[in-house]
Image: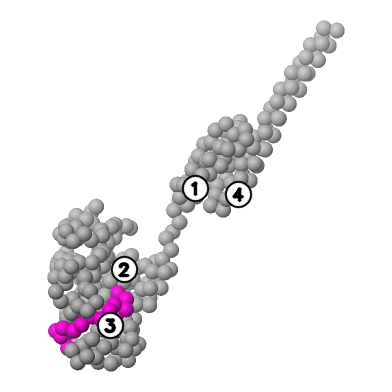
């Protein structure tokens, strides 16, 4: 209950989006899928305001953004280009690169971490999903 | 003659009394072993011990959930000659098994850490422990990746650099 008070703003936003909120062993867990990247970004902004260096070790924020196969995703690397790989894993050879800000096509999700995409040159391969943000 | 008869009666009473008492003890012991045997036949009741005194069975020990506790009581209540059951069994849930979660996090960690060469991470019981250093602007990216692996907790001991 103390944690729900500490992260009240986050909990309220999570409730509005029907996310799963649970508490166990002094850790508050918020998980689920939100309709767009804005909501996810807002949640992380709130988290960062409360705990700028993510050091209190009492929150797990496992938020995914809804995206359907065939939808568009934007490359959100910090500055480097995003590797497109032959298979789902960093041990796989790089078959192409996507620029920051590029909007490419999601073909399917291999798993939560690796998504199969097609870039604007028609090259297909796998990218790490944390660097892809669904475009509405 | 009268004295002899009295002695006889006294002896009889004593013998009968002792007999009744010892018979009672044998009964309790028999009930107890019958009840224990039934409990031992159920693997989930392996931690339960029964003692019987004056036909009242007392259950002690531990089980993993409430249903096992009440099941132990019903098993012993059904034993012949048991008049009542005192259920002092403690419910201690088993420690959760995190091996599958640890394996899935460990499998995904190299990819998540690929762009963060100065960070090391270990996993135990679903808890990701971070050591090393990181630039402040990379921290949230890393935390988003790690939180997406659905850990129980992230222990962040990273030195955050400007």
Determine the chain carrying the residue at label 4.
Answer: B
Q: Is residue A76 visible?
A: no
Residue lying at the far top in this picture: please name it: B2
Q: Residue at x 69, y 27 (%)?
A: B21
Q: Earlier in the sequence, mark 2 or mark 1?
A: 1
The circle drawn on residue B68 is 1
Q: CA distance from mark 4 to mark 1?
A: 13 Å
> Which of the two discs, 2 and 3, sits closer to the camera?
3
Q: Residue at x 64, y 41 (%)?
A: B34
Residue range of the region highlighted in magenta in the rendering: A97-116
Q: Residue at x 32, y 78 (%)?
A: A110
How far from the left and from the top, in percent, is residue A118? 23, 86
Q: Is residue A75 left or right of residue B110?
A: left
**A98 in the magenta segment:** yes
Q: Nearer the viewer, residue B56 or A95?
A: A95
Magenta stretch secondary structure, dominant: strand
**B1 in the magenta segment:** no
The local secondary structure at tag 1 comes to: helix
Q: Earlier in the sequence, mark 2 or mark 4?
A: 4
Q: Nearer the viewer, residue B146 or A21?
A: A21
Q: Is residue A8 visible?
A: yes
- Residue A56, placed above or below residue B119: above
Q: CA distance from mark 2 to mark 3?
A: 21 Å
Q: CA distance from mark 4 to mark 3?
A: 55 Å
The local secondary structure at tag 4 comes to: helix
Q: Provide the residue designation for mark 4.
A: B40
Q: Is residue B162 left or right of residue B69?
A: left
Q: How many marks?
A: 4
Discs 4 and 1 share one subunit = yes
């Amino acid at each position: 209950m103390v944690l729900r008070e500490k992260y009240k703003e986050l909990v309220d936003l999570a409730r509005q989006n029907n996310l799963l909120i649970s508490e166990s062993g002094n850790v508050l867990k918020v998980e689920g899928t939100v309709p767009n990247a804005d909501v996810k970004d807002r949640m992380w902004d709130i988290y960062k305001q409360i705990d700028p260096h993510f050091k209190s070790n009492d929150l797990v924020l496992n938020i995914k953004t809804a995206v359907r196969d065939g939808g568009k995703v934007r490359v959100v690397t910090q500055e480097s280009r995003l590797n497109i790989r032959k298979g789902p894993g960093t041990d796989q050879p790089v078959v192409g690169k996507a620029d920051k800000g590029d909007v490419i096509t999601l073909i399917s999700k291999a798993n939560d971490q690796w998504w199969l995409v097609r870039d604007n040159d028609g090259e297909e391969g796998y990218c790490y999903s944390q660097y892809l943000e669904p475009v509405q | 003659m009268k004295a002899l008869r009295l002695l006889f009666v006294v002896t009889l009473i004593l013998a009968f009394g002792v007999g009744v008492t010892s018979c009672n003890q044998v009964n309790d012991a028999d009930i107890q072993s019958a009840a224990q045997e039934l409990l031992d036949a159920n693997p989930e009741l392996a931690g339960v011990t029964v003692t019987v005194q004056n036909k009242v069975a007392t259950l002690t020990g531990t089980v993993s959930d409430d249903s096992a506790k009440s099941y132990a009581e019903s098993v012993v209540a059904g034993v012949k000659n048991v008049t009542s059951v005192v259920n002092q069994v403690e419910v201690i849930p088993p420690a959760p098994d995190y091996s599958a979660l640890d394996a899935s996090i460990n499998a995904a960690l190299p990819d998540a850490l690929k762009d963060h060469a100065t960070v090391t991470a270990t996993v135990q019981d679903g808890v990701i422990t971070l050591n090393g250093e990181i630039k402040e602007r990379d921290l949230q990216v890393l935390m988003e990746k790690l939180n997406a692996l659905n850990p129980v907790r992230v222990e962040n001991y990273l030195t955050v650099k400007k």
